[in-house]
Image (cartoon, helix red, strand yellow):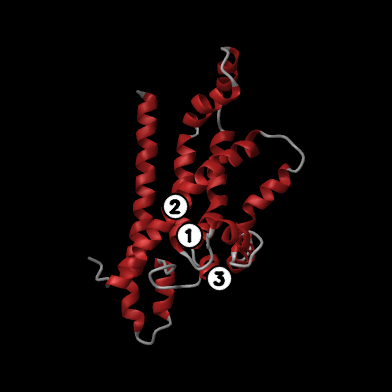
Amino acid sequence: MFGLNEAEWAAVALSLRVSLVATACSLPLAIAVAAVLARGRFPGRSLLDALVHLPLVMPPVVTGYLLLVLFGRRGLIGEWLYDYFGVVIAFRWTGAALAAAVMAFPLMVRAIRLSFESEDPGLRAAAATLGAPPLSVFMRVSLPLAWPGIVAGAVLAFAKALGEFGATITFVSSIPGETQTLALSIYNQMQVPGGEHRLWPMVLLAATLSLLALLISEWLVRLHRRQDAG
């Protein structure tokens, strides 16, 4: 199917792995940040909002370079991770997941935040008057109501991570079998003379994966609404 060779299927598998890890690891933080931005009123809120959305407006290659400065082998954080834990992130698939998570994080936060902001505050107030502590109100009222936004945010982040290119190639390069995702494989094939015939199968597969993610998201949201209606 799709006529891909072994190396190209390896790039597809790596892309799925990177996207899933990036989405799963950043989702709890995205929910927390979205809740703070939706309801919090504190000094520096606007600055936090700007920092969260900075990767959307900053050139991806700049984001990748900053990640290299911070998490490279001799970076501010990367050197500490290597010296104390033996962990290397730059030029590893984990670095690709980190780059994808950073680039996708703003989209996830925005979708979840909009869901929190559309929530009826009366429901939280009713739960509080019944004696539920704030954490219980958040877990039992706010999160279930925000479920469609959380799903939408996670899917948007997954799709963005699947197609991430600029920050990834800057931070972890394009190493076959280690950091070469589907997007990087497509780019590399474009640099090969006569390699155009290999592009369409990978392009079609990338489009198919993105479409499937959106369809699954829509199905989950509709299922949740049916359960609520029932």
Q: Is residue 199 above or below residue 163?
A: below
Task: Give the numbered dot on residue 21.
Answer: 2
Proximity of marks 1 and 2: CB atoms separated by less than 8 Å = yes
Q: Where's residue 74, x and y in %?
A: 63, 67
**Quarter the C terminus occupies:** top left
Q: Is residue 66 above or below residue 53?
A: below
Q: Is residue 92 above or below residue 128?
A: below
Answer with mark 1 or mark 3, whichever residue precedes in sequence: 1
Task: Give the numbered dot on residue 205.
Answer: none
Query: The disc labelled 2 sits on which kind of residue?
Result: Val
Q: Where's residue 177, x and y in %?
A: 38, 69
Task: Give the numbered dot on residue 94.
Answer: 1
Q: Residue at x 55, y 70 (%)?
A: 170
Q: Where's residue 39, x and y in %?
A: 65, 33
In the image: residue 122, left or right of residue 207: right
**Crowdedness of circle 1 by 10 Å Cα count: few (<14), some, many (20+)?**
some
Q: CA distance from mark 2 to mark 3?
A: 19 Å
The secondary element bearing badge 2 is classed as helix
Residue at image mark 3: 170
The secondary element bearing badge 3 is classed as helix
Q: Residue at x 77, y 40 (%)?
A: 43
Extreme residue toward the right, this view: 43
**Disc 1 or disc 3, which is closer to the eye?**
1
Answer with mark 2 or mark 3, whichever residue precedes in sequence: 2
